[in-house]
Amino acid sequence: MFVDAAQLDSTDFASAGWVEYIGGLKSGNLSIEFHDDVADNDVDEELWALLGTVVAFTLKPVSGATSASNPEYQGSVLVTNNGAQAHEVAVSRIGEGGSLEEFMSTLAADPATLDPAVAARYAESGGGITPIANLADTFSQQPVNAVDWFFPTRITIDANGADQMRMNPVAKYLGLRLKHTSKVNLPFYVVQTDDTGGDVLKGARNWIKRTKTPKSQTVMINADPQMSHLDPLMATPKKNVFLKTVGPFLKKAFATRGNRRR
């Protein structure tokens, strides 16, 4: 169970040059893992019936009498997710490999009847570059900020504020200081996946034109179409173009910079 409170800016002229905050509305997330059972009137059927409803809960660290060392939490929650069956299908039919985007789109369309022809292609391809186990581990962690918070809302706000590398209303709202682009002279690395239709590399070239970063310290990798958008994060290291190229880039770019001692 995770509980947090919104952070509201209360800075005023009496803040003495400091940003001040007060607590706002509180919210929480309760995640429970079950051993699924699809027998009649068992776990899977019971949980499916609760999806989209508000239910009461009682939570303790351990079973037993409530005490100072074993407090009891009570409340009501809206059940918004039931992923047991989809995860079971993914693991049993796909195994350890597969094309991430094709798998996700197929699974989203009909998780209970994943196309056997698609599953066969995963096996024939040698498992793709991102194991399904990596995908499950990444997105089954709590809190799942990868999908619940950062994507798609926050990443859209950040991109709108910073993608032009110039001050605009969103950048000002986020407190960014995009006023020194022309003075930047840092090493630069970028990898283009099959997402955005090449716009990542286009943006990178535009960045090089507007900054003082030398081409000798710039590495631009085109991994389209072999890598999907999430593959740099989750692909098997031996098949991960990002990991194979970013290491040498860092060694070269920062070998003689800063306070590194030999």
Image (tube, rainbow, N blue to C red):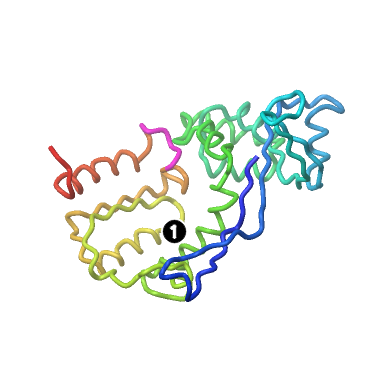
In this picture, which residue range is highlighted in magenta? 233-238
| Residue depicted at 71% across the width and 31% down the height | 60
Task: Look at the magenta stretch and give its main secondary structure.
Answer: helix
Query: In terms of image quadrants, where is residue 103?
Result: top right
User: Horizontal and vertical percent for residue 190?
Assistant: 33, 53
Query: In terms of image quadrants, where is residue 87?
Result: top right
Q: Secondary structure at mark 1?
A: helix
User: Horizontal and vertical percent for residue 69?
Assistant: 66, 29
In magenta stretch: residue 236: yes
Asked whether 28 or 192 is in front, the reply is: 28
Report the residue that reaches farthest toward the right: 41
Residue 150 against residue 75 in the figure, above or below? below
Asked whether 187 or 194 is in front, the reply is: 187
Left or right, residue 175 beside residue 212? right
Assign the C terminus to one quadrant of the image: top left
Residue 240 against residue 259 in the figure, above or below? above
> Could you tell me the amino acid type at mark 1?
Gly
Left or right, residue 204 beside residue 82? left
Report which residue position mark 1 lands on: 197
